[in-house]
Image (cartoon, grey):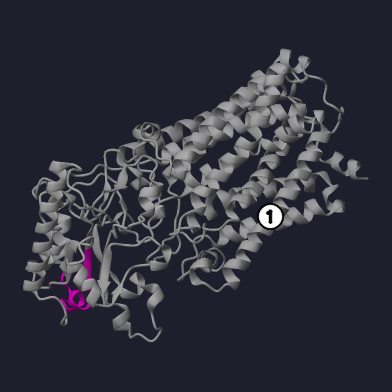
Amino acid sequence: MKKGLTRRELLAGTGAAVGAAFVEGSAQRTALGAVTGRKSPLWGIAVDLARCAEKTGCHACIDACHAVHRVQASEDERHQVKWVWKEPLARVFPEQASGYETEAQLQTPVLVMCNHCTKSPCTKVCPTGATWRRSDGVVAMDEHRCIGCRYCMAACPYEARSFNWVTPHPSPSNGNFPARTAGVVEKCNLCVERLDNGQIPLCVETCASAGAGALAFGNLEDANSPLRQLLAGRQVRRRHPSLGTEPRIFYLV
Amino acid sequence: MAGPHRHPRLVWTFGVILVGLVVLGGVAYALQARTGLGVTGLSRELPWGLYISQFTFLVGLGASAVTVLLPYYVHHQKVFARALILGEIVAVIALTQALLCITVDLGQPGRLLNILLYPAPSSLMFWDCLTLAGYWILSVVGLAAALFARGGSPAKWVRGLALATIPWAIGVHVVTALLYAGLAARPAWMTAVLAPRFLATAFASGPALLILLAGGLARAKVFDIGREAVERLSIIMTYAATASAVLAALEAFTAIYSGIPAAGEHLQYLFLGLDGHLGLVAWTYASWMLLLLALVVLLIPRLRRRQKLAYGGTAAVLLSVLIDKGLCLVTSGFVPSPLGYVRDYQPSLIELAIVAGIYSGGALVFAAACRFLLISESTIHALNPPPQTAREPGMATVAHMEN
């Protein structure tokens, strides 16, 4: 693999992978067990750190996600709701610093979101099953069942979960994604509403169309998927690997 | 018996203040329910504060009924007959307050029953709610049984129930500790010592409260649990408080000596402050100074013999645990956040009003329990006289016992 992903590679790759996966998925849905040897897809995202950082000040994916999912920015710092955002490298990977990085290196913005962990602590602690892992690996959230105890926020080692401290008043103009009420937790849903329609997550799509091509999406179950090829060919980091959560968001160094 | 009637005005003034605080708490809660938990001092980085802290402290008080149940039902120490009634009343009230604390903390309290409708056995909070509700019921039945027994020998089924209640009470508090201790994201709580520490602080703060209440009730000539019961409770409290200090120190050693940043950063925040944030430093020192002073007083016989000092030490134990468990322990677990942010927590006036309302309600129920359960003619006459008639009940007698 060259320096990063070209836009063409990325679109072609993910598109093909998604297409294949959804053929599989629908076959499985209609035949329900009659199809053997075909597993449910397992979605993952790779973030190319260098490519993402290259586009200084770019927040196309964040804006697109937050607009469509009606995530409202709060004026109060304590009440921020975030699905996808950027944090300095030193905070995202605190255990992997040499101690001799330049300030600029430490401050490199890194895209962070829910890691859709294989062993997700949040789903384990939820007392009502309001958040759970789908068979395709997405850690989903039912904001109508959530009682707002915030145990999942205490359990998440990535600060990926946000609580609606006040009633959000998002603009109704952007799509038809339902707005939340006060008193429930929310987070990145890996665009389940799009996945279930055969589309790739919006952040990945937006990143590609913005010309950054720093995000790749695909099926981890398929050894030939472009995502798996990427992971095989590059040095990969995951956040807090020692905690055993096994994130499905990968960072390409 | 004539105690409270000697100062009717004082009693009424106090009652009116408590009712006022309950109403204020209710208004504050209505406001919170309307606008959301944004009216609290909580944040994205620090999502649990005073409510969950106080819940933890109150579950400890509820579980501490063990310190009267165990001697009375297992070791047949009849001197605890009256302390048992007082202990059960306090336990039921504390547990009710604990349940209220969780409820006011919920973002969607109307969905509380989802915990039962969609049971999630992998969640410690699910088990915490189940065991708490069960323990609440056991305690209410136990209290009723203790009142009906009127100080006489308990019925066989009552003893059986009490024997089941003892491990249940310990279990409830252990489950509360496990709720924290199993989170990889929060190294401050992720220690096997947390559960024993919870038990130690519970068995220190519970008897401390009982001793203080018993002292007040005896002084007001309402109800006398007997000097020997007070003395034995005081010993249980002293040992438990010592154990809690030792456990905390052992935990601090592991955290600091290992040198792992994540293991010790919360201690740095508590004792020195982190990144210039001193949020809990004053509280931490207050809690530790109170505990150490209390231990000096309670462990040295010459000091312990002085009644006022002994009561002071008892109050210090209670306050120390209230500060530690009821504020510092839970909130410091969120500092620093997993991304390394340090966010101080300052309870808002709304939070303080709601918690004050919950405590005032508890105090009112306790007063009513004293009036209708403890000094009702039938109860007081039916109960055996206190094991030793003490003219000056309280811990002055502790000294005599030791001599």
Q: How many marks?
A: 1
Task: Let me know if residue A12 is in the magenta part.
Answer: no
Q: Closer to the camera, A78 or B94?
A: B94
Give the residue at x 46% y 70%: B276
Q: Is residue B32 left or right of residue A234?
A: right
When the figure is inspected, residue B79 is found, relative to residue A73, above or below; the finding is above
Tell me where residue B2 appears, x and y as whole percent: 75, 20
In this rendering, does residue A183 appear at all?
yes
The quadrant the C terminus of chain A occupies is bottom left
When the figure is inspected, residue B380 is found, relative to residue B395, above or below; the finding is above
Give the residue at x 40% y 40%: B120
Q: Report which quarter residue B108 is drawn in.
A: top left
Magenta stretch, residue numbers: A45-58
Tell me where residue B172 appears, x and y as whole percent: 57, 39
Q: Which residue bears the numbered disc 1?
A: B291
Tell me where residue B112 appears, x and y as whole percent: 38, 34
Q: Closer to the camera, B93 or A46?
A: A46
Task: Let me know if residue A53 is in the magenta part.
Answer: yes
The quadrant the N terminus of chain A occupies is bottom left
In this rendering, does residue B10 appear at all?
no
